[in-house]
Image (tube, rainbow, N blue to C red):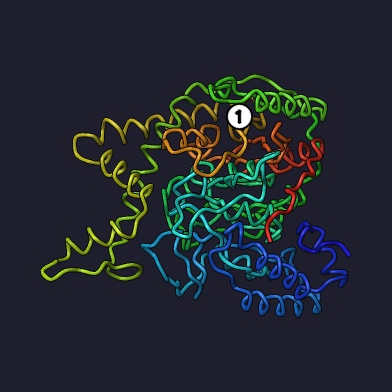
């Protein structure tokens, strides 16, 4: 019998509707896989009983002929999404044992469509990191390993639990969030598909905030078709999120024709950067060649303000984080430090935040507070906002000439855990992805090949705002042309 945990959503949907398998049977297969996957540390909370209840309800809907595409599909949920009655602490001790009395809009949408929750997935603390090494739960380990090495590799970050769980078949799909590349970079590192929708396409209500003008939720899946199915459920117009775009959600799966003849694909010359490996450049060139073979026209474009994107991002994101995280003070929920006799409210704030936040979060709070402080606000924050406007203008002008933009997702394949101790070196992992968040555009990473060390590598496609259907179709065509089918050799469990 086919390994049920290796099925795509589309395949599982067909089998469920044909009654070849049941949602309960599928869910039990994943519960078993999750129990055997502890070596990866991908799950921070397991919810097998909730999964069984949801699977039972999904079977009833399937029997009644009321079966949306996600009915009975087992998912893992990033710890940044609030899930009613289930620990949701953003990978941080400051929110230890926080059980929300409400459900995020995204997870509400998924459960309404019959999806099954296997548990919550580890992440970098408050989504601040590119390697999943800042979580209070400890490091997440990639299921991939380099040739002739047992060194533990990063699954990427901040959504490392999401990418690792999917790549190891511990979920059929997972949710992630992307503030500067936290869906696309982990997807590239693990040979999975990661989609960051347009800012405002998916509601942020009930998602613990990092940088509100940059954060966007999206799916990790095995295929582009599965991404289209997941986005169709996750996206919605939401009155509870004032930044939710009042644009109807189309049928993204129906857009997947695979025909991109006549499309113009841009190659930004500024994305050839120091630190990019030769095999990354070769993969990019091969992707462009495949686009030409599919009937698209490939043209060079310029995004001249690209070199300012990373420094501007690391001013704006910490500034918003310092504001958003000010609410975690030990008063209403989460961790509160033990106080000494004579301590007042100031000491409570100081001790609670010092104990509750990890080193990377403290670093970004301090950076953000500094750039927002009197005397520096104009010099840093306002200047970064002006640069953001110029970056968006670059994309607007480019999209007058092209339909999509093709770039590498990351400069290198996955690196070993602990290998990057310099924060600036770590921040460079986002060099190809932050521009998309700064401009509020949709981007998708698809697995495109293997490195010489036997590790997956990804290519990124960037699309026009709110035209995810067209972007997904372009990615679908490239995915079919590449035919990536590599999976990690199982060493865990």
- Image quarter in which the C terminus is found: bottom right
Give the residue displayed 41% in from the left and 59% down from the top.
92
Q: Is residue 313 visible?
A: no
Give the residue displayed 40% in from the left and 29% down from the top.
387
Q: Is residue 191 visible?
A: yes
Number of disc labels? 1
Residue 406, quarter of the rendered image: top right
- Residue 459: give x, y in percent of width and height: 67, 35
- Image quarter in which the N terminus is found: bottom right
- Is label 1 in a helix, a strand or a loop? loop
Give the residue displayed 63% in from the left and 78% down from the top.
49
Residue assigned mark 1: 399
Which one is in front, 451 or 248?
451
- Residue 389: give x, y in percent of width and height: 43, 32
- Residue 463: give x, y in percent of width and height: 63, 37
Task: Please rate how many residues cluster around mark 1, counting C-alpha atoms within 10 Å: few if below 14, some from 14 to 19, many from 20.
Answer: some
Which one is in front, 87 or 382?
87
Above or below 309: residue 21: below
From this viewpoint, which residue is outermost toward the left?
A: 342
Above or below 247: residue 477: above
User: Is 229 positioned to the left or the right of 301 in the image?
Assistant: right
User: Is 49 positioned to the left or the right of 200 in the image?
Assistant: right
Which one is in front, 355 or 391?
355
Above or below 315: residue 489: below
């Amino acid at each position: 019998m086919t390994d049920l945990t290796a099925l795509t959503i589309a395949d599982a949907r067909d089998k469920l509707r044909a009654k070849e398998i049941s949602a309960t049977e599928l869910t039990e297969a994943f519960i078993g896989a999750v129990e055997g996957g502890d070596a990866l540390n991908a799950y921070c909370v397991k919810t097998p009983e909730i999964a069984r209840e949801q699977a039972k309800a999904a079977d009833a809907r399937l029997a009644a002929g009321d079966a949306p595409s996600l009915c009975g599909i087992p998912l893992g949920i990033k710890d940044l999404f609030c899930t009613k009655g289930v620990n949701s602490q953003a990978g941080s001790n400051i929110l230890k044992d926080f059980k929300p009395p409400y459900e995020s809009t995204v997870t509400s949408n998924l459960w309404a469509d019959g999806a099954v929750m296997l548990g919550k997935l580890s992440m970098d603390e408050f989504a601040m990191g590119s390697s999943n090494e800042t979580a209070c739960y400890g490091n997440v380990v990639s299921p991939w390993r380099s040739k002739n090495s047992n060194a533990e590799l990063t699954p990427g970050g901040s959504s490392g639990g999401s990418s690792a769980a999917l790549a190891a078949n511990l979920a059929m799909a997972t949710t992630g969030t992307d503030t500067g590349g936290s869906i696309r970079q982990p997807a590239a590192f693990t040979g999975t598909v990661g989609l960051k929708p347009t800012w405002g396409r998916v509601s942020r209500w009930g998602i613990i905030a990092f940088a509100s003008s940059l954060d966007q939720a999206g799916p990790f899946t095995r295929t582009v078709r599965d991404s289209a199915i997941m986005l169709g459920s996750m996206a919605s117009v939401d009155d509870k999120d004032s930044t939710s775009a009042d644009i109807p959600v189309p049928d993204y799966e129906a857009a997947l024709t695979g025909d991109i003849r006549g499309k113009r694909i841009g190659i930004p010359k500024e994305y050839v950067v120091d630190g990019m490996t030769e095999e990354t450049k070769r993969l990019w060139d091969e992707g462009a060649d495949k686009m030409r073979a599919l009937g698209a026209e490939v043209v060079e474009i310029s995004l001249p303000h690209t070199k300012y994107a990373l420094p501007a991002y690391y001013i704006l994101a910490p500034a918003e984080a310092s504001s958003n995280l000010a609410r975690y003070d030990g008063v209403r929920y989460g961790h509160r430090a033990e106080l000494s006799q004579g301590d007042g409210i100031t000491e409570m704030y100081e001790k609670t935040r010092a104990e509750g936040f990890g080193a990377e979060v403290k670093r970004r709070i301090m950076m953000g507070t500094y750039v927002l402080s009197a005397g520096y606000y104009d010099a840093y924050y306002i200047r970064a906002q002006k640069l953001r406007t110029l970056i968006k203008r670059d994309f607007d002008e480019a999209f007058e000439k092209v339909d999509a933009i093709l770039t590498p997702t990351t400069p290198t394949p996955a690196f070993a855990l602990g290998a990057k101790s310099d924060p600036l070196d770590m921040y460079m992992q986002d060099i190809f992805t932050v521009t998309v968040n700064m401009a509020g555009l949709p981007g998708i990473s698809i697995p495109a090949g293997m490195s010489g060390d036997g590790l997956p590598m990804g290519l990124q496609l960037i699309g026009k705002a709110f035209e995810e259907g067209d972007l997904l179709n372009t990615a679908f065509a490239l995915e079919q042309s590449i035919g990536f089918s590599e999976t990690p050799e199982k060493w865990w469990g």
